[in-house]
Structure formats: C-alpha cells, structure tokens
Amino acid sequence: MPCANTCTDLLRKGDVPIPRFSQAIVHSGAFRAGGALIVDSRDSKGNIQDQIDDAMAFVQNNIHCALVITPGKVDHDPVWDYPLDALRETLANAICHRDYGAPYDIQVKVFEDSLRISSPGQLPFDMRWNFSWILRIRRGRETR
C-alpha cells in the first residue's frame, strides 16, 4: 500500500512547522523606499489553508484598494491593485507545489509598485522554462 502521508497531506491536515518541515512557512514582507525599508513582516505557519489565508490577509493589508462609485448604484465597488482571485491562486500554487525538501521558505514581497511571490524548487526532469512571454503585473498595468 502506498504511503498515504505525503508532505502535502501532512501539511493539509496538521499543524506545521513540525520538525521535518520547519521550513514549510510563508515569510511575507512589505517594503518601501525601493526595498530599503521594511514596514511590515509576518511568518504564516500552520496547515496549508491557514498559510494561504494568513498570507492573503497580509497582502490585502499591504496593497491599495480604491473604492469606485458607480452612478445609479447604492454601494461602491472595491478595486484592488491586483486581482484577489489570482493572488490566492498564486499563493495556493506556491504553497502546494513547493519543494518540501528544499531548506527555504516561500517569500511574499510587497513593494510600492510590484508584488513578488517566490517558491523554492525547480522544474522536474531538468526542464527549462521560457519566461519571455510572461506578463508582469505592476499596479494594475501589464508590462512586458
């Protein structure tokens, strides 16, 4: 019978970091002055869902949200710097698909004009990735 307790399964069900996965956290930081000043920092621990929720709360606390008033509507519409669904999906992928054997944590860096999420690991089987087509999103504008 195959082992039912994979790394992701353990982290999905239990509290971490446990000794074997002490690096399985999300370290988040908000920076100003071109990255020279740290204005907020948080380590998100616990199971995978807790890490996703906590990291999302950190990002939402450190990015801008404009309130747009539409004529004829009673309520205003929030417009975030970055699409929240895309951020949650990116965080979930970074956490679920990270290399749990690597001794590094996931990093979320919120800058004044950009957001970076990095996850340790590499592509399997010495695959190479061509990043030339990826769009970088900076404060609601797509750039190449």
Image (spheres, helix red, strand yellow):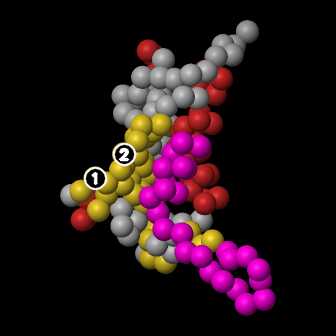
Quadrant where the image shows the N terminus: top right
Amino acid, disc 1: Ile
Amino acid, disc 2: Ser
The answer to whether residue 96 is above or below residue 80 is above
- Whether residue 4 is in magenta: the answer is no
The answer to whether residue 140 is above or below residue 60 is below
Identify the residue at horizontal 57%, vertical 56% (top origin).
87
The answer to whether residue 106 is above or below residue 46 is below
Classify mark 1: helix, strand or loop.
strand
Quadrant where the image shows the C terminus: bottom left
Cβ–Cβ under 8 Å for marks 2 and 1: yes
For label 1, the crowd category at 10 Å Cα-Cα, with few meaning under 14, some 14 to 19 and many 20 or more, is some
The magenta segment: 53-77
- Label count reads 2
The residue singled out by tag 2 in the image is: 41
Identify the residue at horizontal 44%, vertical 71% (top origin).
138
| 18 sits left or right of 37 in the view | right
| 41 sits left or right of 96 in the view | left
Residue 14 in view: yes
Name the residue at the bottom extreme: 71
- The picture places residue 80, in percent across and down from the top left corner, at 56, 69
- The picture places residue 14, in percent across and down from the top left corner, at 61, 21
- The picture places residue 67, in percent across and down from the top left corner, at 59, 76
| Front residue of 82 and 118 | 82
Identify the residue at horizontal 69%, vertical 16% (top origin).
4
- Whether residue 55 is in magenta: the answer is yes
